[in-house]
Image (tube, rainbow, N blue to C red):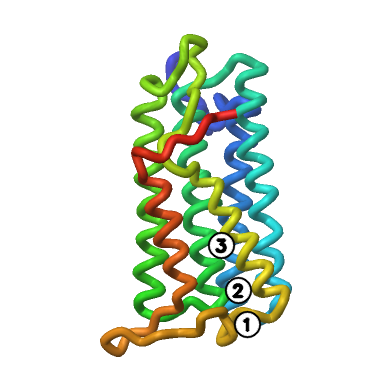
């Protein structure tokens, strides 16, 4: 009986850095739900709420690594938590924001799905190659491909468009129809960004 696991034993084992990582995921999930609520009700407050939560998620993503290093408690569990939270906050949520901003054609959907798939693939590759990319100190020296949090640049661009009224049916470059399926050229930016994330030739120094 003494060795029987206690209730919520996994949660009890979480470190402070793990809880901050979870907060990153919670904020991303909150943003996703806010964008969904906007699509349903067309109340712009929810669009801006979702937009505001994502930079806070980035702050949590930055803090968790610093806390782990300072306390010397980095772990494989924390690494996996970080990747899963990042998929939500910097992969799925930005794609949902694009959908909410007006990219709702069939080809738009394929572009956004491709973007999310690239984000998942990029994080999986990072997890299995982190040791190979580490320098003598054991710290990863560079990224292969765009880090997934850089998707906040797409979020910023969409926020500027929305703030200036260039969204929904007023997206720049309009909409084209290919074989009867709608495509907003802005969706191709997500394809470009996703391709950058899975690139093996694009190397970015890690701060």
Q: Measuring 59% from the left and 37% from the top, which residue is drawn there?
A: 21
Instruction: Look at mark 3 in the image and give the residue it sits on.
Output: 32
Query: What is the distance, in whole Å, between disc 1 and disc 3 at their CAs?
Result: 14 Å
In this orientation, does residue 7 appear? no
Where residue 105 appears, as percent x and y from the top left, is 41, 80
Disc 1 and disc 2 in contact, CB within 8 angstroms: yes
Q: Secondary structure at mark 2?
A: helix
Q: Measuring 47% from the left and 44% from the top, which residue is drawn there?
A: 146
Above or below, comparing residue 49 to residue 26 in the picture? below
Is tag 1's residue or tag 3's residue first in the polypeptide sequence?
3
Quadrant position of the C terminus in the picture:
top right
Instruction: Look at mark 1 in the image and give the residue it sits on.
Output: 41
Which of these two is toward me, 202 or 162?
Answer: 202
Answer left or right for 37 relative to 188: right
Where residue 13 appears, as percent x and y from the top left, is 55, 24
Q: Measuring 60% from the left and 25% from the top, which residue is drawn there?
A: 15
Q: Secondary structure at mark 3?
A: helix
Using the image, tell me which numbered label, if any, was put on residue 115: none
Is tag 3's residue or tag 2's residue first in the polypeptide sequence?
3
Which of these two is toward me, 185 or 4?
Answer: 185
Instruction: Look at mark 2 in the image and give the residue it sits on.
Output: 37
């Amino acid at each position: 009986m003494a060795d029987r696991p206690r209730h919520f034993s996994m949660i009890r084992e979480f470190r402070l850095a793990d809880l901050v990582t979870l907060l990153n995921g919670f904020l991303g999930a909150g943003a996703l739900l806010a964008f969904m609520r906007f699509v349903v009700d067309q109340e712009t407050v929810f669009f801006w709420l979702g937009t505001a939560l994502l930079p806070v998620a980035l702050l949590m993503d930055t803090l968790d690594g610093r806390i782990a290093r300072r306390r010397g408690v980095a772990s494989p569990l924390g690494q996996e938590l970080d990747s899963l939270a990042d998929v939500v906050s910097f992969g799925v949520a930005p794609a949902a924001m694009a959908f909410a901003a007006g990219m709702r054609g069939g080809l738009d959907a394929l572009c956004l799905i491709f973007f999310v798939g690239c984000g998942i693939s990029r994080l999986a590759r990072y997890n299995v190659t982190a040791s190979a990319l580490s320098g003598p100190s054991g710290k990863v020296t560079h990224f292969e491909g765009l880090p997934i949090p850089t998707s906040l640049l797409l979020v910023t661009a969409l926020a500027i468009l929305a703030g200036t009224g260039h969204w929904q049916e007023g997206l720049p470059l309009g909409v084209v129809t290919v074989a009867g399926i709608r495509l907003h050229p802005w969706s191709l930016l997500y394809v470009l960004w996703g391709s950058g994330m899975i690139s093996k030739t694009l190397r970015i120094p890690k701060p």
